[in-house]
Image: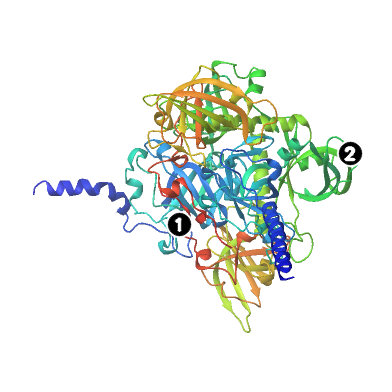
Amino acid sequence: MKHTLPLLAALLAPLTPLFAEGAPFRPEPGKFPPLEKAHSYRGELTFVDHTNRRGSIRIQGNGKFRFTGPSPFAMLPYGMVRYHGAPADLRDIPLGTVMYVHAFLPPDPKISSVPVLPIDNRLKKLGNTGIGTAPAENHVLLLEDETSHCRRHGLVWKLKQVTLNDHAGFITARRELKAGGGQAHEETLTFDAATRFWRGRERLDVQDLIAEKIWPANGKKSLENQTVLLGIIWKPTPGGVFMRFHVSDVWLNDAAMERAAQNQTETHKAFIKSRWMPGWVDAVEYGKFGNATVTATLFGGMDASLYADFKKGQKAMLASAENTLKHWASGTAGTSQMASKGILANITKAKGNVPFGSSGTQISLKTDLVTEGFRPGRIVRIHPNSWPIVEVPRDEYLHDARTTHEDRFPTPDIFPKY
Amino acid sequence: MKLNFSRWVAALHLIVFILVSNAIAQEKPFRPEAGKFPPLEKAHSYRGELIFVDHANRRGSIRVEGTGKFYRNDPHPFALLPYGIVRYYDAPADLRDVPLGTVLHAHGFLPPDPKISAVPVLPANNKDKDAGHYRGTGIFPAENHVLLLEDEPSHCRRNGLIWKLMEVEIKGNEGSILARREPQKKDEKKYEPEKMTFDAATRIWRGRESIRISDLINEKVWPANGKKELNDQAVLLGITWKPAPGDGLSGAFTRFHVSDIWLDDKSIEHAAYFQTEKHNALIRSRWMPARVDEINYGKFGRATVTATLFGGMDSTLYDDFKKDVGGQINGAENTLKHTAGHYGPGHMASGGKFLRIEKTSGKIPLGSSGIQIQFETDLIIEGIRPGRIIRVRPNSWPKMQIPREEYLFNNFPKDRFPTPAIFPKY
């Protein structure tokens, strides 16, 4: 009996962090959850279902990475993807890319499009994969690659040493604050003949660096803390190493990184202009005969020029959407034909700290065709008149006559169980 | 008279039977046979946009170009044949290497064995049906088991084709290009031009430089606004699809988008180099796929396995297979997944030695490398049988563990034979 209490305490100890602040935190409708409350992890992107804004990541735990089964995740409707330090869609990220994830428990487990797991799952040891490889926090607010992570935090990689043998080898490097100070993180990574080196507008390979006598053909060389940014992926490593990441890209200067970011920004801008800006409805003021003023907050993480296209007094279209950001369309009628037209009556920009997921920009649209999809808390997509009118592909809209329950609320069945 | 009439009826029946059976024989749809590489000429060819990838099971979906409105076409599931080849940037590739949105040329067959198809089995004449809803014909071919899947530059280089840029029309770093694809070697035929869009994200490759539209404008190669004749400038194009204005109720039904322009040979060879090296590293870690041709059983588990290595890889990989060199051989599935268990293929595979490496002379069918190996092992196992898929590794390749989704463990039927249930129905 005298051992019962200590034993109980020992059993409950791992769970206490989850309950330290009361009930586990879940994002609430109509509120952007604070990034600080997210559970953060990183891993390799292994599967993408971009039309339903979900996928799988092999999460880095404390065990053998290769045993770890891909862990499904879903983007929150206002969840942001960043690649090369620029806004991105899931379809833009190559499989194999190592991503940083900031995620929450499912806001509403009943309609989760990925498996709902026990809330203490991130504390469980899952065989050889170790702890932390299948967290229940699989609804993602921010998904970013290494370069985006570094640029957001003002970090750079300092290259210490290269060991080279037949165009492949190891780099020892340290990730630290560009401004200096703070805690540095040292890591040994592999590279190979497929690793790309970006210098201004040049793309080089390892052989080019050897030819220019920057790197030795074989053996070791100190790189004297050369400042770079790294693109990181995972591939199997020889030997008994549990987990070692791989360098896919090295950006040797700011000009090279800016060019990559610019390219991704332009890709994403064209994407959003064709699929429309996502947002959610804050309020609806009903008038007569179908007239209403819809106030909505535009989601964040886009290029500033897209928000600048929303101007007071301009014509715009508003379309209802789903949590996956899929549009609604009809038989022969496309998204623009189905959307409600109106005038942007007001554009306001929030001052101060804007939470992740939000742009801080609120629009009010006066329309004479308020529809069922425009309700406070619901997802919409908005199109200012200056953007081109195009049709979205079949997999990216719900068909009003043929849409099933599963189209609106995709089930997690797509994900294999390992 | 009655007898004669009966004779006539019998003769008529015979004629009708012969005609019908001939027609059936002629129309019997072609399916790849076990142990044979099907001829590319018998494949049904189509092109479309890569929409979805399940690379671990070597399958995905393509929005196939038909005769109707492209954006309305549902993604169409496909599976790679075990010996199916993927090419990207004119280099060997895995499905995981090809970005979503890329327009690919597919050469597919009917499912070799419909019972275990990993993608939906469709009526054999599906490619001739009008899918309705303005989608036209040809968008859901039953020939969804793919022998060759290649992007635009790979398709052009394989067939000796080139794009000739005729005219550019530009406004604010985006616009349209008029170009025609024709053989590098001139002939008398007239080739129709195609209008494609481009935008500020289009990458232009010149030697080892990556430049963009604004760079071409700054260099006064392209105008900042308006039209310019490009005088049949020879290039290679990377082609994707994205919605273009006018795709809807009026205007262009299908308009493709230029993602990349390679201005010279050096630039495409540079792209091919990176892709080749990436694929070489993949195959060295996942091993060379092959099919067992023959087994000669010895005593106490010994056997000599004769197998044909699959084709489409970089030649340096085949060069690593040498006579009298040690190696390993492991059972695999049609998806090329290893049968491994948690110990990993390196631990589970049968060890041995390559006794003979033979290169076929003459025409080699696509899918085959034309290289046959003879491998002696003292641990012949169930997965190594004539007609079965294996993976082979010479000992010069590094021993690595592969990720969880790329090997079978516990061997549920759905792991060995993935069902088509993953694909949504529209």
Placement of B420 over or under B263, stated as above or below:
below
Residue for badge 1: A412
- Which residue is denoted by mark 2 in the rendering? B187
Location of the N terminus of chain B (image quadrant): bottom right
Mark nearest the camera among 2 and 1 is: 2
In this orientation, which residue lies closer to the viewer: B16 or A348? Answer: B16
Distance between the alpha carbons at the discs numbered 2 and 1: 55 Å
* Residue B267 drawn at (x, y percent): 74, 32
- In the image as oriented, which residue stretches furthest toward the bottom? A289
Asked if A391 appears above or below A7 in the picture, the reply is below
The residue at 63%/84% (across/down) is: A289
Type of colouring: rainbow
Residue A76 shown left or right of residue B188 in the figure = left
Badge 2 density bin: few <14, some 14–19, many ≥20, Cα 10 Å = few
- Quadrant housing residue B221: top right
* Residue A20 image position (x, y, % from top left): 30, 53
Drawn side of residue A114 relative to residue B43, left or right: left
What crowding class fits label 1: few (fewer than 14 Cα within 10 Å), some (14-19), or many (20 or more)? some
Q: Residue at x 34, y 54 (%)?
A: A119
The three-letter amino acid code for the residue at tag 2 is Asp
Q: Position of residue A335 (x, y in %)?
A: 66, 66
What number is the disc on residue A263? none
Residue A129 image position (x, y, % from top left): 37, 39
Q: Chain of mark 2?
A: B
Q: How many marks?
A: 2
Q: What amino acid is found at the position of numbered circle 1 in the picture?
A: Pro
